[in-house]
C-alpha cells in the first residue's frame, strides 16, 4: 500500500480521545437517525458524538454541489469545530447517515463552556480536531490525485473500516445507503463514469455485482499497490 501525506486515514475521522467521548456521554442527549437521513448541521448549534453508524459530511446544500468532506465513525465528534470558531454563523454543510446512527447531541454553547472551564480537556479536543483536519485534507488530496478506480478501492476500504468490518477474504456487500449516486459524491466523480468504472472493475475480478448490490473483498486493494503520488 502506498504512503499517505497528511494522514493514514483519508476521509475517515480517527477516533477521539476518551475524555472528549466521556463529556458527550455524560452531558449529551441521546438521539438516533435512520440511514439516508439528512442533517443540516451547518446551520445548527449542536455537536454530535457518534456511538454507532456512519455519518458523511458534505459541502453544499441538497441538490447542489454536494461533495464529500469526510466520514465520521463511532467514537468521533462532528459539528464541534465550527462551534468554537468565534461567533456562530451558518455554513453550507450537510451530513448524511450512511448507516443507522445512534449519537449524543450537545449544545454548542454547553460544549464551549465545558472546554473553557477545563483547559486540559480543551487541549485534548484541539489535538483531536487537528487530526480531523488532517484526515479531511488527505481525503481531498486522494480525490484530486488518484484515478477513479484507485479512489473506488480506497473509499471501499475506508467505508468497511469505518463500519467495523475491515476488508478480508470474505466478500461483503457495500451498505445499501451507498448507491452509485452517493458513491460518486464520496469520490468526487461523475455518476456515469463511476458506473462504467465499477463494471470494468467487476470484469477484472476486483468486485462482484449481484443485482443492485456491490460485493468486495481485499482483492480490490491490489489496485493501490503500485500507486505513486509524486
Image (cartoon, grey):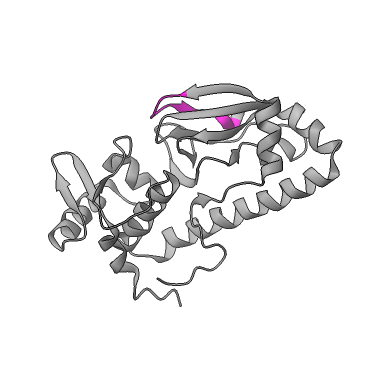
137 left or right of 175? right
Q: Is residue 37 magenta?
A: yes
- The percent coordinates of residue 109 (x first, y second) are 76, 27
Residue 45 seen: no
63 left or right of 71? left
Q: Which residue is drawn at 74% across and 39% down?
A: 84
Q: In this view, does 59 lie above or below 127?
A: above
> Where is the N terminus found, in terms of image quarters?
bottom left
Q: Give residue 7's quadrant in the image.
A: bottom right
Q: Which residue is drawn at 60% across and 28% down?
A: 104
Q: Which residue is drawn at 52% across and 60% down?
A: 138
**Segment tinted magenta in the rendering:** 33-42
- The percent coordinates of residue 223 (x first, y second) are 29, 67
- The percent coordinates of residue 56 (x first, y second) are 46, 40
Q: Give residue 225's quadrant in the image.
A: bottom left
Q: Is residue 168 magenta?
A: no
Amino acid at each position: 500500500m502506498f504512503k499517505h501525506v497528511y494522514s493514514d486515514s483519508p476521509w475517515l475521522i480517527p477516533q477521539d480521545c476518551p475524555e472528549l467521548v466521556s463529556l458527550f456521554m455524560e452531558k449529551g442527549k441521546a438521539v438516533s437517525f435512520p440511514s439516508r437521513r439528512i442533517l443540516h448541521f451547518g446551520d445548527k448549534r449542536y455537536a454530535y458524538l457518534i456511538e454507532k453508524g456512519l455519518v458523511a459530511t458534505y459541502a453544499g446544500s441538497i441538490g447542489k454541489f454536494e461533495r464529500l468532506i469526510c466520514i465520521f465513525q463511532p467514537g468521533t465528534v462532528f459539528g464541534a469545530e465550527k462551534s468554537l470558531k468565534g461567533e456562530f454563523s451558518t455554513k453550507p454543510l450537510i451530513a448524511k447517515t450512511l448507516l443507522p446512527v445512534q449519537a449524543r447531541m450537545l449544545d454548542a454553547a454547553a460544549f464551549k463552556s465545558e472546554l473553557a472551564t477545563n483547559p486540559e480537556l480543551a487541549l485534548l479536543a484541539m489535538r483531536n480536531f487537528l487530526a480531523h483536519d488532517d484526515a479531511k485534507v488527505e481525503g481531498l488530496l486522494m480525490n484530486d490525485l488518484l484515478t477513479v478506480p484507485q479512489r473506488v478501492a480506497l473509499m471501499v476500504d475506508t467505508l468497511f473500516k469505518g463500519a467495523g468490518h475491515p476488508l478480508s477474504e470474505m466478500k461483503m456487500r457495500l451498505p445499501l445507503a451507498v448507491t452509485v449516486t452517493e458513491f460518486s459524491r464520496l469520490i468526487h466523480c461523475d455518476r456515469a463514469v463511476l458506473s462504467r468504472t465499477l463494471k470494468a472493475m467487476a470484469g477484472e475480478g476486483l468486485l462482484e455485482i449481484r443485482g443492485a448490490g456491490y460485493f468486495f473483498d481485499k482483492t480490490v486493494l491490489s489496485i493501490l499497490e503500485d500507486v505513486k503520488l509524486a
